[in-house]
Image (cartoon, rainbow, N blue to C red):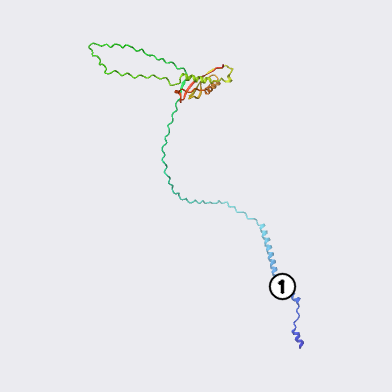
Amino acid sequence: MTTILQSQALPKPVDVQHALRGRNVAASSERWPWRAMATALALEAILLGVTAGWLARSTPAPKPVRNDSPVMLSMVEPEPAAAPAPTVKPPEPVKAPIKQATPVKPVAPVRHELAPKPETSHTREPVNAEAPPIKTVAGADAPPAPSAAAAPEPAIPPVSASSGPDDRFIAKLRAAVQAAVVYPMALQGMGLAANIDVEFGYKDGVVSNVHVTRPGRVATLDQAAIAAVQRAAMPPPPPNLAGALHTFKVRVIFSEN
């Protein structure tokens, strides 16, 4: 009886290695579905990537659609700006009318020919010293005597001489021009002589508008005559010629000595 109780009380020995193997097999059987799923997902991802790359290479890029239709643009008119308020201008000062100066008419130059003046002779008619006697007829009525003596007529003032230049001033002009004559070097030795008339304006010792009125046979002498008038030291004007423009004509003499 004792032996049976001991055998029932003691447990059976357990195989530890077999138990560990069973656990490993169960654990490995539980891990296998997850690994299979992960592997399948990785393969699908690889296949999708390869397929997408192949499609991207084989499919041509879409051409851009060209739109040739005109583009309609509408201009929006700006709203009219509000009109500015009118500015009140100050009244302009009244300008006094400007009087225009009356133009001074140029005085025409007085022309003087340097020619000798003709002598004027003044003759007087003889005055009868004796008046014819008055005959009276007897019995005839004598003419009434004048109540008052007739008033004498006013004496006519003597005519003054011309206000032109006198002979002395003309002689000074001729001498000044002739002193400035220079015979051209190019004509020396040819024995050429000429009398050339030159006209010029004179005002207060200054000459202007010098030109030849009667030229010679050689143009070089004409130019020398003009140069002599321009180069001459003109005398000062007399009082009756001062301040006015006068025209003179002189004869320039060229002779090779």
Residue 27 visible to an observer of this rendering: yes
Residue 166 placement, left or right of 39: left
- Relative to 136, residue 200 above or below: below
Residue positioned 69% across, 67% down in the render: 38
Q: Quadrant of residue 181?
A: top right
Residue positioned 71% across, 72% down in the render: 27
Residue 214 visible to an observer of this rendering: no
Q: Position of residue 45 (x, y in %)?
A: 68, 63
Q: Position of residue 126 (x, y in %)?
A: 36, 12
Which quarter of the image is occupied by the C terminus? top right
Write down the residue under mark 1: 27
Question: In this orientation, which residue lies closer to the viewer: 88 or 45?
Answer: 88
What residue occupies the far left of the structure in this picture? 139
Residue 96 placement, left or right of 70: left
Name the amino acid type tagged 1: Ala
SS category of the residue bearing label 1: helix
Which quarter of the image is occupied by the N terminus? bottom right
